[in-house]
Image (cartoon, rainbow, N blue to C red):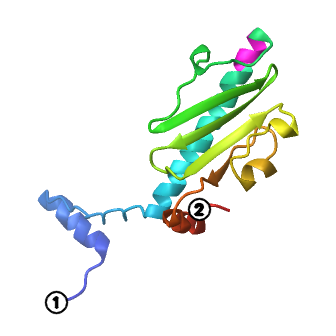
Amino acid sequence: MPVRPLHFLLAAAALRGTVLLAQQAPAPAASASDQQRAAMVRMKNDLRNLVVAEEMFWSKASRYSSALDSLSYTAGAGNSVTVSPLQPRGYAASVRSADLPNVVCSLFVNLRKEDIPNNGPNALAAGEGEPVCDLVKSPEATRQLELDILP
């Protein structure tokens, strides 16, 4: 039997009213490392969104808020955000995720060096307003996480 070009087969199928369906291969499942990275990105995004909400509050009140309730801000699903107003014109914030219980992401705005919370080596090295993540001191279960996703 002679080999016919694909366009000939498609034209013949169209004339007969036959529909040719191509079956798409399923997408590969996300690895645990990919899911952990995604959770960390969501945590950092929550902190960035908090900074925007705090700056909007500052523009109206000339101070940062002392409670999340006074902001038009909601943390992402599974994330818990804590804000510590340490000075009248500065604050520190941290976020924890149910998906990454051994990681804390934090940032600070307008704080003296001695007031910056020590959540880990990355938090101390971060610049103002820069969300960074660190492992919380915990058992060996975090070793693989440290190898996979933290810088």
Check the picture and name the quadrant holding the C terminus.
Answer: bottom right
Residue type, numbered disc 1: Met
Check the picture and name the quadrant holding the N terminus.
Answer: bottom left
Q: Residue furthest top?
A: 61
From this view, report whether residue 118 is shown above or below residue 84: below
The residue positioned 75% from the left and 10% from the top of the image is: 60
**Crowd band around label 1 with a 10 angstrom C-alpha radius: few (<14), some (14–19), many (20+):** few
The residue positioned 30% from the left and 63% from the top of the image is: 24
Element at badge 1?
loop
Q: Nearer the viewer, residue 4 or 73?
A: 73
For label 2, the residue is 149
From this view, report whether residue 121 is shown above or below residue 63: below
The residue positioned 22% from the left and 61% from the top of the image is: 21
Residue type, numbered disc 2: Ile
Q: Quadrant of residue 48?
A: top right
- Looking at the rendered image, the disc whose residue lies closer to the viewer, 2 or 1, is 2
Q: Main secondary structure of the magenta part?
A: helix
For label 1, the residue is 1
From this view, report whether residue 22 is shown above or below residue 133: below
The picture places residue 29, in percent across and down from the top left corner, at 37, 62
The picture places residue 76, in percent across and down from the top left corner, at 50, 35
Tell me where the magenta segment starts and ends, as one range: 56-60
Q: Of label 2 and label 1, which has the lower sequence position?
A: 1
Q: In which quarter of the image is residue 111?
A: top right
Give the distance between the C-alpha atoms of the residues marked 2 and 1, in whole angstroms. Answer: 56 Å
